[in-house]
Amino acid sequence: MTSPADPRGTVATPPAPDLVGRRNIFLNLFFGRDSSIERAHLRILRLVALGIVFENYDIGLVNSALPQIAPDLGISEAQTGYYTGAVRLGGLASLLLIPLADIIGRRRVFLLALIGMSLGTFLTAFVQTPWQFVAVQVVTRAFMLTGATVAVVILVEEFPASQRGSAIGLLSMLGGLGYGLGALFYAFVEDLPFGWRALYAAGAAPLLLMPFFRRSLAETRRFERHSAERGARVVTGLRDWLAPFVDLVRSHPRRAIVVGAAGLFASMASIAFFQYTSYFVQKMHGWSPGHYTLLLFGAGALGVFGNVLGGRGSDRLGRRGVGFVCLALAPLFAFAFFQGPEAALVPAWGLFVLCMSAGDVIVRAFAAELFPTGQRGTSSGILIGVQAIGFGSGLLLVGLGTNWTGDLGRMVSWVAVTAVVAAFALLLLPETHQQELEEISPGR
């Protein structure tokens, strides 16, 4: 391709990319000192991460405030797994929304998700019964997971091949600030007016930022090219909505099944552990909400390095190997947390977070990278739906096992072993790091 010429006949030099300086220690942690990041890419990352902060805020509240929510709504200890498992099934409802990202665009669906999850979090503050809580949270979770999924797709399509994993890892870390924000507020739950309900009412904040998101977030260049090639598409019936699913099943069934298996078993392990950490340390070890918050901020800092390992580590060493090691080791730390001495609680929690954070980054990267542009949103959406089944199944197993054995800690530990199955599933996938998306999966 020749460079465009100016009116005087000289060849115009393409403008140099606007790069972020390498002295940024925080960015060097994720991308390395030898990596240059375009400012436009960093701007996109900040935008989608800001939206994901609010998603993780709501998810973190369910985990942290369960000891307060359960008695207020009349939920017994044995029933917590059933109700929270039902909430997690909201990921299945996201399958109604995420395919639209392959039809009407990433930007529109991401903005819709922000509105839906903000309203849902706010309405949760007013529920009066367990099933009202489940119903509102299912809808909210569908929008939250849609937003998180589309955010990953946006980064995968916009960042260069050498930085895709690092971008997803940084997104996960920044989004994790939502957990920290929720944990910080939760430390004062006993002093807030209306208790845990006040925490959910604060979830309406993203609505105030919608004008900013609408102005700042653009459609991805890959989707724009894809739309120009195929022509405008609209959803006029069930056939149009199902088209991305049908295309995916016909073109890449094996990849979809293996990625789904990895997501299913990893999610069973993670939800069994994270859902009951607050409950376990407060009920079994007598910790206060403030002490649990210190656990999240202290040992949880290791989760940052899990995102670095899953992102930058897999960009350099390969997705499969890093993912296998992290997911295979995670159950050891679950056993140490729930069945070891009290002195093991903090390091075991941090190391489990590190391993599962890295594994999650890698599974999400595979779900987006292994499929062409016209199926990328749908493939990531299927992962979310499968993970929702995993969340529900994991909590169901914990609930049934606890009723049978009477030992919550033991059941959580054994359900966490499912992460090993996810580790082996990753070995069945083709390697994707350092490859352009069009090389990994040609086609539209």
Image: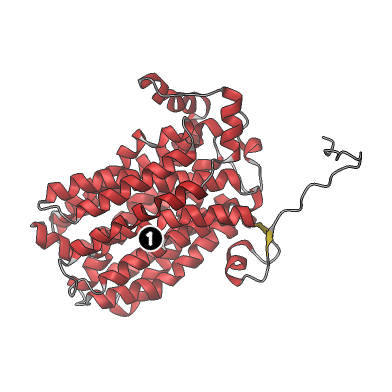
**Which amino acid, mark 1?**
Pro
Furthest toward the right, the residue is 9
Quadrant position of the N terminus in the picture: top right
> Residue reaching furthest front?
7
Tell me what residue is drawn at x 31 percent, y 61 percent: 60
Q: Is 196 rendered above or below residue 214?
A: below
Quarter-of-image position of residue 58: bottom left
Residue 266 vs residue 373: left or right? left
Count of marks overlaid on the render: 1
Viewer-closest of 59 and 19: 19
Q: Is residue 388 left or right of residue 65?
A: right
- Where does residue 2 sit, x and y in percent of width and height? 85, 36
Do we see residue 273 in this rendering? no
The colour scheme used to paint the residues is: secondary structure
Residue 308 location (% of width, % of height): 54, 63
View extreme (left): residue: 74
Residue holding disc 1: 331
Q: Residue 444 lies in what quarter of the image?
A: top right
Q: Nearer the viewer, residue 183 or 323?
A: 183
Q: Relative to residue 287, is residue 264 depicted above or below? A: above
Vertical order, 101 against 247 (above or below): below
Q: Residue furthest bottom?
A: 343
Residue 309 in sight: yes
- Which class describes the residues within 10 Å of circle 1: few (<14), some (14-19), or many (20+)? many
Give me the residue at 45% from left, 64% from top.
Answer: 354
Q: Secondary structure at mark 1?
A: helix
Which residue does the image show at 43% across and 27% down from the upper left?
245
Q: Position of residue 8 (x, y in %)?
A: 91, 40
Residue drawn where x is 37% and y is 48% of the image = 114
Residue 65: give x, y in percent of width and height. 22, 64
In-front residue for pair 244/213 = 213
Report the side of 187 relative to 163 (left or right).
left
